[in-house]
Image: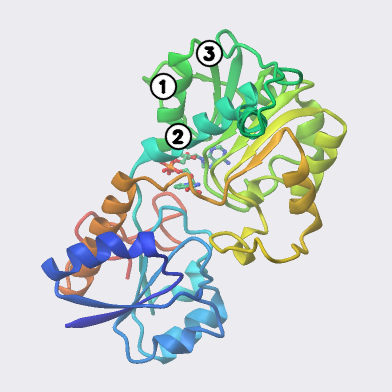
Amino acid sequence: MKKLAFFDAKPYDKIWFEKLKGDYGFEFKYFENKLNADSAVTAKGYDGVVIFVNDTADKKTLEVLYENGISVIALRCAGYNNVDFSAAFGKIHVVRVPAYSPYAVAEHAAALLLTLNRKVHRAYNRTREYNFSLSGLTGFDLHGKTVGVVGTGKIGQVFIDICRGFGMKVLAFDPYPNEGRGIDYVSFEKLCQKSDIISLHCPLTPSTRHMINKDSLSSMKDGVYLINTSRGAMIDSEALLEAIKAQKVGGAGLDVYEEESDLFFEDYSGSIIQDEILARLISMPNVIVTSHQAFLTNEALFNIAKITLENLKEFYNGEGLSNEICYQCQKQGKCVKTKNTRCF
Ligand code: NAD
């Protein structure tokens, strides 16, 4: 029986892994703490490691894991910006769940937009105190507005379909356009200038880090709404805060935050938050922060567990790894891996 160290474990993670593990013959030890260079040694004696978005698999962590006999890391998520792939290459195979429910994330992006625009978060608080005033709750029709979608992969496309359902005009930017879906692709600069709402759906890479910054924000329409369900560091949070204070940005729906890893997924309601930018953002009436919950549907949790277990089964059976990823994969066409082989 293969024993796996499962980091950053939460009750909702365990449900499907516990239900399905019997079919695969795996045993899980659930660690509530996150993986990092200090905690990596706890993986000693295990056959593999299962991690999530805010675990750290940097060079130092990978060295400790490798020294302790770990040869596979299973990411139970799609994004992989927390892994140093060049340090892992040739030593530790990294598998992920490339898609588990694009609907979950796209629908959450839509929920943030609708809530922000129609001030549902404020109305909810008011009526709980029998305050039935409508002052300050005016929104705008989404119908006829222009939404700019950055990244038209699996999630971006579902979000586009949702927006089209509302009668919105869609502009998109993606360096690898998805032709044949009738999407109106424009440059990132034009998208910023023309959109009433901008929603981010691309991975965090060196080229997308802080793509929403002082310059791009200044080129946007006054009162633009920003929705981010991708990765926090795509937005320079300080620049966003300034743009909100200057009323350049009319609303921001943030499911992710660039400094989220020390905070999100935990209860700090009895603590003093030291992150001044996050605290100020949360204090704004036109900002909604959710703590990286866009993926959190029953369907997504089932698929995450099932695909992670399949990935591990392929690894231990010595088969090709359908969902392996390495730094060569990220350079289009450079990886030797085919559908039925491994990256190394
Ligand atoms: P995907 O790989 O299907 O699509 C990503 C798209 O982004 C691709 O079309 C790609 O060409 C495009 N892209 C790459 N570089 C770009 C750039 N510089 N500018 C614009 N577009 C670029 O991925 P997906 O499944 O649609 O997921 C998108 C992102 O959503 C993930 O990378 C992840 O960070 C995030 N995500 C968040 C949650 C959550 O719970 N908040 C859950 C899942 C995924």
Q: Which residue is mark 3?
A: 168
Q: CA distance from mark 2 to mark 1?
A: 9 Å
Residue 183 is situated, as x and y percent measured from the top left of the image, at 46, 19
Query: Within 10 Å of the Cα at label 3, are there few (<14), some (14-19), or many (20+) other Cα atoms?
Result: some
Which residue is pictured at 27% across the width and 51% down the height?
Answer: 303
Residue 23 is situated, as x and y percent measured from the top left of the image, at 11, 66
Query: Within 10 Å of the Cα at label 1, are there few (<14), some (14-19), or many (20+) other Cα atoms?
Result: some
**Mark 1 and mark 2 in contact (Cβ < 8 Å)?**
yes
Residue 299 lies, with reference to residue 94, above or below; the image says above
Q: CA distance from mark 1 to mark 3?
A: 10 Å
Which residue is pictured at 16% across the width and 83% down the height?
Answer: 1
The structure's colour scheme is rainbow
Q: Secondary structure at mark 3?
A: loop
Decide which of tag 1 and tag 3 comes sooner along the chain: 1
- The amino acid sitting under disc 3 is Met
Q: Nearer the viewer, residue 320 or 34?
A: 34
Decide which of tag 3 and tag 2 comes sooner along the chain: 2
Decide which of tag 2 and tag 1 comes sooner along the chain: 2
Residue 212 is situated, as x and y percent measured from the top left of the image, at 71, 39
Q: Nearer the viewer, residue 303 or 78?
A: 303
Residue closest to the far right: 246
Mark seen at residue 106: 2
Q: Secondary structure at mark 1?
A: helix
Q: Which residue is mark 1?
A: 161
Residue 298 seen in this snapshot: yes
Residue 321 seen in this snapshot: no
Q: Nearer the viewer, residue 297 or 52?
A: 297
